[in-house]
Amino acid sequence: MQKLVRGALIECQVSGSGPNLIWGHGLTSSRAIDDVRPRVDWTEVPARVVRYDARGHGSSESTPELGNYSWAELARDQLSLADALHMDQFISGGASMGCGTSLHAALAAPERVTALILVIPPTAWETRALQANEWERTAIAIEKGGVEAIIAGPESGPPPDPYLNDPDWYDRAAAATRTWEPSRLARVLRGASRADLPSRSQIAHLDVPALILAWSGDATHPTRTAEELHDLLPRSDLHIASTRPDLEQWTRHVSEFIASKHHPDA
């Protein structure tokens, strides 16, 4: 289904039953891309799960203003989507960009976000400027040579530790990149270069249950960020996956976290 959210048509789907959970994917991903390599089996999660394509991603509308792609603005999109779906309160979760979106949503509407599920937290704070420069260089390369200019193979470095022995990692990443129209991809990358997590002091004031799931071996999603979030958030649990069996426990971690908090149904 589509919902008009702050001037953009946002594609979303709702499934399951239980407490409301709104899930945001990572930068350059989408619901369809995540379905190819799922990290959480949403059919096993005891919640009414809303998955959506963020502004500019997947089947959702791409809008021209780069400022609308910061994580703080994407959080406003998420809260407006909750309004459109008549969800007064919800668990906010997401991976990478979706993690940043969730933290900003919790700060913007603490009375509405009942818990956080923060997956592969990205670079933040002091390390963010270097990543922002990389996104800008990537956007320029796309504009000059299309998406093929940024498709990398094994020579670009290893995948995250849980995927080290996955023979299809690079092929799946390349296939996902090829689904993008170049100008749309360059736009969301430039928008991400303007994004960061909330400040450490802001996060420390979030008195809300939080589950943090990270993996090792990924410079774009360093365990340092996850560990700092765990230190800052007063009611958080942290699990770091270094192997594929560790990663396969994420659905259980999410399900047990939701069940243990006894969140009210919609």
Image (tube, rainbow, N blue to C red):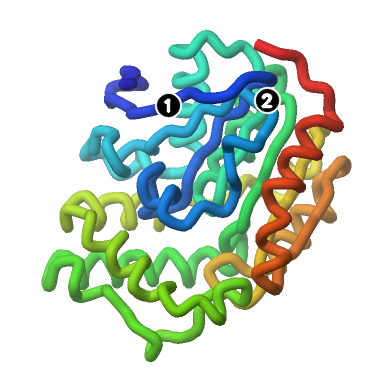
Query: What residue did someone put label 2 on?
Result: 113
What residue is shown at x 31% (from left), y 43% (from top)?
Answer: 57
Circles 1 and 2: CB atoms closer than 8 Å: no
What residue is shown at x 70% (from left), y 67% (from top)?
Answer: 245
In-image side of 82 versus 248 (left or right): left
Assign the N terminus to one quadrant of the image.
top left
Whichever of labels 1 and 2 marks the residue nearer the N terminus, that label is 1
Q: Who is closer to the viewer here, 13 or 185?
A: 13
Question: Where is residue 246 drawn, in percent x and y?
Answer: 72, 65
Amino acid carrying label 1: it is Gln
Amino acid carrying label 2: it is Val
Assign the C terminus to one quadrant of the image.
top right
Question: Where is residue 251 drawn, in percent x and y?
Answer: 68, 47
- Element carrying mark 2: strand
Depth check, mark 1 against mark 2: the one in front is 1
Q: Is residue 109 visible?
A: no
Q: Please rate how many residues cluster around mark 2, counting C-alpha atoms within 10 Å: few if below 14, some from 14 to 19, many from 20.
A: many
What residue is shown at x 68% (from left), y 61% (from top)?
Answer: 214
What residue is shown at x 42% (from left), y 26% (from top)?
Answer: 13
Query: What residue did someone put label 1 on?
Result: 13
Work out which residue is located at the far bottom of the displayed protein and give it: 155
Q: Is residue 43 visible?
A: yes
- Element carrying mark 1: strand
Question: Where is residue 3 drawn, in percent x and y?
Answer: 34, 18
